[in-house]
Image: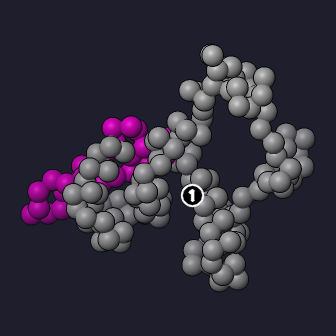
Amino acid sequence: MEWRELDLGNCSVAATLNLVGERWTLLILREVFAGLHRFDAIAEHLGISRRALSERLRQMVDVGLLERRSYQEAGQRSRHEYHLTAGAQDLQWVLAALLQYGDTHLGDPAAPPVVLRHSGCGGQVHLELHCSCGHEVAGSDVEPAFGPGAVRMST
């Protein structure tokens, strides 16, 4: 089978983009990863309209990326905070990859606006590709291969 014969109906990239491909989704995740959990704080920091944020947060809760938790400040009505689900936590490396790419190719690599730190030791976190043999691999050395779920397009 050749690549062009592959049925992309079960493509993992397409499925993930369907989940997070809308621009605001990754930016909202970035905000929640950084510790902003309340609607007003997210809206203000992103500069997103309240209507757009409300709709996007609802969708993200519906698909299981965020969890809504109630809170109430003294004398105020009950409101919601938004927290990452375990599935959303697993997307942190995607955001880290976008950050690293942007720092390397779009910004000043010597002066990145944000660095990721390991909470255990304070060291700077970066992403690398590694083969199952343990060796670091350059992106140019990676090639797609058919996996056990590959299906030939029906003609």
Tell which residue pokes out farthest to the front in this image. 155
Q: Is residue 149 visible?
A: no
As shown in the figure, which amino acid type bears the numbered disc 1?
Answer: Leu
Can you give x and y, in whole percent of width and height, for residue 93 in the image?
A: 62, 53
Image: 135 above or below 110: above
Quarter of the image containing the N terminus?
Answer: top right
Observer-nearest of 49 and 130: 49
Mark 1 lies on residue: 95
Q: Quick check: is 152 in the magenta stretch?
A: no
Q: Which residues are magenta?
A: 61-88
Can you give x and y, in whole percent of width and height, for residue 125 in the image?
A: 69, 64
Can you give x and y, in whole percent of width and height, for residue 117 in the image?
A: 63, 67
- Which residue is at 56% across, 45% downward? 90
Q: Quick check: is 68 in the magenta stretch?
A: yes
Q: Is residue 152 visible?
A: yes
- Which residue is at 35% across, 72% downward? 45
Image: 141 above or below 117: above
- Which residue is at 43% across, 57% downward? 23
Query: Which quadrant of the structure image shows residue 115?
Result: bottom right
Observer-nearest of 16 and 73: 16
- Which residue is at 85% across, 39% downward? 132
Residue 141 located left or right of residue 72? right
